[in-house]
Image (cartoon, rainbow, N blue to C red):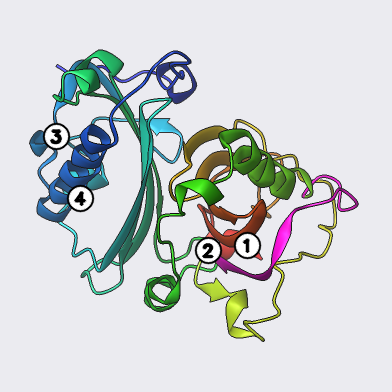
Amino acid sequence: MIRFLLPGLTLATHAAAACSRAALQEVTASYIRAQTSGKPDELHLASNATYAENDKPMSITTGVLSQAITIDFSRSIHDTVECATFTELTAATSPHPYVIHTRMIVSPAAAANMTPEITAIESVVTDQGDWIFNATSHLYWTQQEKWDPIPESQRDTRETIKAAADAYLDQWANSTLPVPLGTPCARLEGGIYTGQRDPAANTCRMPAFPVPIRAGNRRYVIDEELGAVDVFNGFPWLEATNTDAAMPSSNLVRVEGGLIRYIHEVTVCETTMCGR
């Protein structure tokens, strides 16, 4: 029996944990297999594992993970310090198109024994009607990007990578704050890609929001080898019919030489296009 608790409680980080990259890669590979087949029992779940979609705890047997999905492209990052993984799934040709961001926590002891045991799964599941959703466009642009491993001597620290993502999100509340945006930089927001406009010179710079946006409840997966961090966060104001509510959102960020190179954002709406 799998128990389902509040995501904020079940996904606590393991500060002293250290997991092998190979073990975490097997976790993400098994997740992709399970989502492709719609068979969550292919995952090695802890007896008390938790599952949530769009910040709502639910049974894994009734969630999107129990649906077979045609996955056209996937990208995963692996956090060997926090024993966590992140996977972005693009399902453009599936009968029901999706773009899904999934964060998983692995038991440190299990990972050390090379038998990864998943203790928590949470996903931001977007489909038609969510913020600027277009899986076909998302697939095209994500396949154009280069997310190769960064040579060890050129890698940024975890702190630098996290700080870059935090600066980007903090600017939503205060547009005067500095953000380490590289040139070029490209942001894939739903299905809209800034990199198609003058790709060599784009900087991902954003205009100020009409009101300060405080993106709270941040949860991180950091991969120094890929210079990547994913941040699960709340996105208030965006849903026009309920501006006080924080919409489930995820921002995947690639950092190269201390500067942001890519940003992928997916955000769930309560109404079509969040009523905007």
Q: Using the rendered view, name the quadrant where residue 96 is placed.
A: bottom left
Marks 1 and 3, the one that precedes in the sequence: 3
Image vertical order of residue 143 relative to residue 219, above or below? below
Please report the residue visible at 16 percent of the width from the left and 42 percent of the height from the top.
Answer: 30
Please report the residue visible at 21 percent of the width from the left and 43 percent of the height from the top.
Answer: 31
Q: Decide which of 220, 149 is in the foreground and name it.
A: 149
Please report the residue visible at 58 percent of the width from the left and 44 percent of the height from the top.
Answer: 156
Q: Which residue is the site of mark 1?
A: 275
The CA span between labels 1 and 4 is: 32 Å
Tell me if 131 is positioned left or right of 143 in this view. Answer: right
Q: Amino acid at mark 4?
A: Ile
Q: Which residue is the site of mark 2?
A: 272
Question: Could you tell me residue 167's position as x and y percent?
Answer: 74, 45
The CA span between labels 4 and 3 is: 10 Å
Tell me if 170 is positioned left or right of 42 in this view. Answer: right
Pointers 1 and 2 in contact (CB under 8 A)? yes
Q: Which residue is the site of mark 4?
A: 32
Marks 1 and 4, the one that precedes in the sequence: 4
The CA span between labels 3 and 2 is: 33 Å
Image vertical order of residue 18 relative to residue 216, above or below? above
Residue range highlighted in magenta: 172-188
- Viewer-nearest of labels 1 and 4? 4
Q: Amino acid at mark 1?
A: Gly
Q: Which residue is the site of mark 3?
A: 43
Please report the residue visible at 59 percent of the width from the left and 78 percent of the height from the top.
Answer: 195
